[in-house]
Image (spheres, grey):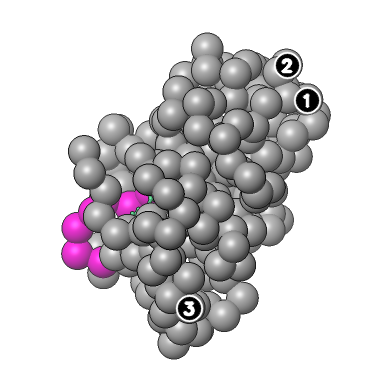
């Protein structure tokens, strides 16, 4: 892959910003989800004015991110294994998928004081990750006590009918407010309008910027 293959990215970012604006989300931050796409795709989206990227897979991120020629804020948004934190700590700026105490402890050890978000299960689907909503506050307190900067909450809806995500998004936003946090990361290519209308401050967008993922 070379940089010119990502020529459509700039246009898609413009179209995405228009889509967000129509949904009432002109202030919403776009996290460009770059899983499965090469370093050149990251550089292309940063050149198109995006400051934040999201990676899902530890091994892929650790091999790809040293190759990029730009300096975006890197969010880790995938299922996180404790033994991957040490390697990822070199690259990750915001840990969005913190959903259990052992991750809090490991991030506090390997990346002291870093910014995290607590991932809350808003889909009822264990494979999506996230803590039980009844334990969100406990995890936020544990992370704060461990010296981490808890900037907000993150949730992943089921990839189904966008409207079906609304109750989960609404719950996440209520927890953000109840805990006095700032950031609410929810919404992907298929359901960003619903997420924005429920108060997302960050949307995580892959396919709408880069096209379909292979594999
Ligand atoms: C892949 C992924 C996204 C982006 O999904 P698209 O449908 O490509 O926009 C967002 N959030 C998480 C957690 C993901 O794994």
Relative vertical location of residue 201 with respect to residue 57 in this rendering, above or below: below
Q: Are marks 3 and 2 in contact (CB under 8 Å)?
A: no
Q: Is residue 173 visible?
A: no
Front: mark 3 or 2: 3
Compute the Cα span from label 1 to label 3: 36 Å
Measured as percent of width and height from the top left, residue 163 is found at 26, 69
Q: Which disc is residue 109 wearing?
A: 2
Q: Are marks 2 and 1 in contact (CB under 8 Å)?
A: yes
Q: Which disc is residue 112 wearing?
A: 1
**Residue pictured at 56% horizontal, 67% vertical:** 48
Q: Which residue is mark 3?
A: 14
Label whose residue precedes the other's in the sequence (3 or 2): 3
Q: Secondary structure at mark 1?
A: loop
Front: mark 1 or 3: 3
Query: Total of numbered circles in the picture?
Result: 3
Measured as percent of width and height from the top left, residue 96 is found at 55, 41
Compute the Cα span from label 2 to label 1: 6 Å
Q: Is residue 84 visible?
A: yes
Residue 156 on the magenta segment: yes
* Mark 2 surroundings within 10 Å by alpha-carbon count, few (fewer than 14), some (14 through 19), many (20 or more): some
- The residue positioned farthest toward the top in the image shown: 83
In the image, the segment drawn in magenta is 154-162
**Residue pictured at 49% horizontal, 42% vertical:** 39
């Amino acid at each position: 892959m070379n940089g010119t293959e990502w020529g459509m990215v700039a246009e898609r970012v413009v179209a995405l910003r228009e889509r967000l604006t129509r949904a009432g989300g002109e202030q919403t931050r776009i996290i460009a989800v770059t899983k499965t796409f090469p370093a050149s795709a990251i550089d292309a989206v940063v050149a198109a004015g995006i400051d934040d990227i999201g990676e899902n897979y530890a091994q892929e991120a650790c091999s790809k991110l040293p190759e990029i020629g730009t300096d975006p804020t890197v969010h880790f948004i995938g299922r996180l294994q404790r033994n991957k934190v040490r390697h990822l700590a070199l690259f990750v700026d915001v840990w969005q998928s913190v959903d259990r105490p052992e991750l809090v402890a490991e991030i506090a050890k390997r990346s002291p004081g870093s910014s995290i978000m607590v991932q809350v299960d808003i889909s009822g689907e264990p494979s999506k990750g996230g803590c039980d909503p009844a334990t969100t506050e406990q995890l936020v307190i544990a992370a704060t006590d461990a010296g981490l900067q808890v900037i907000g909450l993150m949730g992943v809806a089921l990839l189904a009918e966008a409207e079906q995500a609304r109750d989960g998004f609404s719950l996440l936003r209520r927890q953000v407010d109840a805990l006095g946090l700032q950031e609410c990361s929810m919404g992907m290519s298929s359901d960003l309008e619903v997420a924005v209308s429920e108060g997302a401050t960050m949307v995580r967008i892959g396919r709408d910027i880069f096209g379909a993922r292979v594999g």
